[in-house]
Image (tube, rainbow, N blue to C red):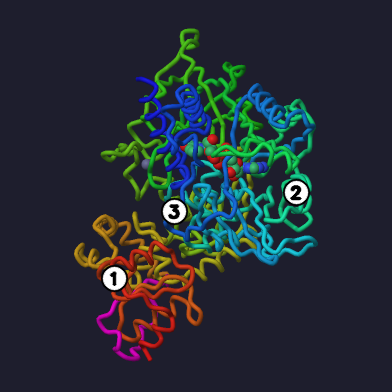
Amino acid sequence: MNPEQRIEELSRQIEHYNFRYYQDSVSEISDFDFDKLLKELKDLEDKHPEFRKSDSPTQRVGGTITKNFETVYHRYPMLSLDNTYNEQELRNFDDRVRRGLDGEAYEYICELKFDGISLSFTYENGVLVRGITRGDGTRGDDITNNVKTIRSLPLRVKGENLPPVFEVRGEGFMPFSSFQKLNEDMDTLGENQYANPRNAASGSFKLQDSAETARRNLDCYLYSFLSDDIIFNSHEESLLALKSWGFNVSPGWRKVQTIDEVIEYIHEWEEKRTTLPLATDGIVIKINSFEQQRELGFTAKSPRWAISFKYKAENKPAILRSVNYQVGRTGAVTPVANLSDVSERDLDYKKVKGVHLSGTRVKRATLHNANEILRLDIRIGDTVFVEKSGEIIPKITGVDTEKRSQYITQAVEFPTKCPECGSELMRNEGEVAFFCPNDSHCPPQLKGRIEHYIHRKAMNLDSLGEGKIELLFDLGLVSTPADLYDLTEEKLLGLEKNIFNEETGKTKKISFREKTVENILKGIELSKTAPFKNVLFGLGIRFVGATVADKLASYFKSIDAIRAASYDELTAVPEIGGRIAMSIESYFSVPENQLLVDRLKAAGVQMESNEKPVELESNVLEGKTFVISGVFENFDRDELKIKIEANGGRILSGVSGKLNFLLAGANMGPSKLEKARKLGVTILSEEEFLGMIG
Ligand SMILES: NC(=O)c1ccc[n+]([C@@H]2O[C@H](COP(=O)([O-])OP(=O)(O)OC[C@H]3O[C@@H](n4cnc5c(N)ncnc54)[C@H](O)[C@@H]3O)[C@@H](O)[C@H]2O)c1
Ligand SMILES: [Zn+2]
């Protein structure tokens, strides 16, 4: 391949990864490997400048803007940072700075590099008016409603010297604690988990539903101040002022005079950063004086007065001792590697402490699926390499095949039967995961179903959290959600169990005292009042998520109508497709599921929608269809929905050619508006609508 072709190929690859990363919040490769590709491209372009295109990924900020939010131009461009993984390049940077400043003395500010997404906040007369993503550096997404959910971000600031308009910038992130909770939730709901807190933060800041963003407990550190008037002389002054105005400035920064002190700072934080409650991927150094920053200027993509140093993910050898196969709630089987340190090769596995990696001891790593085992060509007894980078879950990156001849090794055999229930495993065409088809008797699947039933978005039985279900299940008291309603004080009082967490090696004792039992029974009783749509979602029928359950419940009004519905009747419901209809049919073809529903009904759980039938006020809207979007002044969306139905109109769930009216409130997504305009849908304001119904 000649340089021109390679440049072309690299550009295409990098653009693909950028799109996945910024648009979809997914990392298909590690940051380190991504940065290697980018560096290769940059070096090639430096050697052959004639092949450098103006829109090359080396010349542009990698981010994208989405179509889901208002696009806003940045008042000051939001750039990226040049980065390096080694100290020599950092010294080269220092040389460039020294030359650029012609022998003037200079200082650096060292800061931690937080791993989240860049955000910019505009304040007018002290009031937060806008929050924008970095986007492509020139324009970003207006996500004001979502950034307002950050509790540490002041909505109003007071202080001396505040210019009438200013911007502050910082990194929005998801603390480890929120990340873990979110992924547990995703797991319960059977949705894809985020690989790391950065991707979770990126996805969560760009949700359409701010209430959901709020639940995810995001946070933000501020590290930059911008305004038209120059009111500070240095970065240090601006950080101190930000802090004094009440902004959340991370306390870890330090002013230093030399590159050696910078390197000292890097070494100091290499281990220490792993104890922080949020992900960091390096440090950032910036020239302190604003005057000198202006002298040094910018490239197309990043400032010449700053650089980031990224920590390489620690990669260490370990011994693959054995492989376990975990069966998840959906029946999917995941192979998990049991590891020991190289020095522990001959130690009994029970006594093994694991490999020391990025501040923690690692004893297990996911092998994902059968294909990954083949790809790695891994054997029990092998010396493997483990890595823990931005990802929280350690992974095996390769095998030291040279070591193989020194030890006895043994092939990893993927089981053909479910390790939990013995059923023959299956694999769907086109899918990588093997799964256990025995969904009505396989223990982890049953337990998963109960956990789903009590989930916040289903029956919201929070008095029965983690561990308690496990106890009840293991003692044989509860094996389906219906069993919950047979629990009594006599059965529960005094139950006890030690639950061992293989991951942490810690044992937790759970015991049911009077207060606990009272709360559990109260919660179960209360769950009988949960609306039918929550119950329907709680059943955990495949593809019937909360939104689909809502639609089915309001269309069919009762479980009996749903289970009697034919495929054609199901697919006649707007937005219920063949895949969902088939899944519902197959759910009710299982006798155990029919029984479960009957028992829940007998226990008094809501199996009918008690949405009051709408009383007809008029039929002026007969034959007309509506979509409601945005926020309204006098009504909330449910009230508007009732108004429309009460006057004979019908609600559709999406904008399509069939739609007559889009009832548009404030803050609705511009892409929906655009689509409606294109399709010639009439757009109504709240007032116009009220006029229509008199
Ligand atoms: N794995 C993938 O598929 C993939 C794809 C695209 C990009 N990436 C990663 O993202 C990087 C490019 O992203 P980028 O342009 O945002 O660069 P970057 O993340 O390396 O550095 C710039 C960003 O650092 C952040 N930052 C954190 N702490 C800061 C501080 N104290 N001061 C200033 N800024 C701070 C800011 O958001 C700033 O925009 C790549 O180098 C790569 O590591 C990975
Ligand atoms: Zn099984």
* Quarter in which the N terminus is drawn: top left
Q: How crowded is mark 3: few (under 14 residues within 10 Å), some or many (20 or more)?
A: some
Looking at the rendered structure, the kind of residue marked 1 is Gly
- Residue 686: name its quadrant: bottom left
Residue 693 in picture, x, y percent from top left: 36, 88
Residue 591 in picture, x, y percent from top left: 28, 57
| Residue displayed at 43% across by 50% down | 191
Looking at the rendered structure, the kind of residue marked 3 is Thr
Q: Badge 3 is on which residue? A: 66
| Residue placed most toward the observer, 98 or 509 | 98
Q: Badge 2 is on which residue? A: 239
Residue 183 visible here? yes
Q: Badge 1 is on which residue? A: 680
Q: In this view, does 50 lie above or below 429?
A: above
Marks 1/3: CA–CA distance: 23 Å
| Residue displayed at 49% across by 60% down | 454
For marks 1 and 3, the one nearer the N-term is 3
Q: In this view, does 409 lie above or below 567?
A: above
- Residue 610: name its quadrant: bottom left
- The magenta stretch spans which residues? 604-626
On the picture, is 682 further left or further right than 217? left
Residue 155 in picture, x, y percent from top left: 67, 64
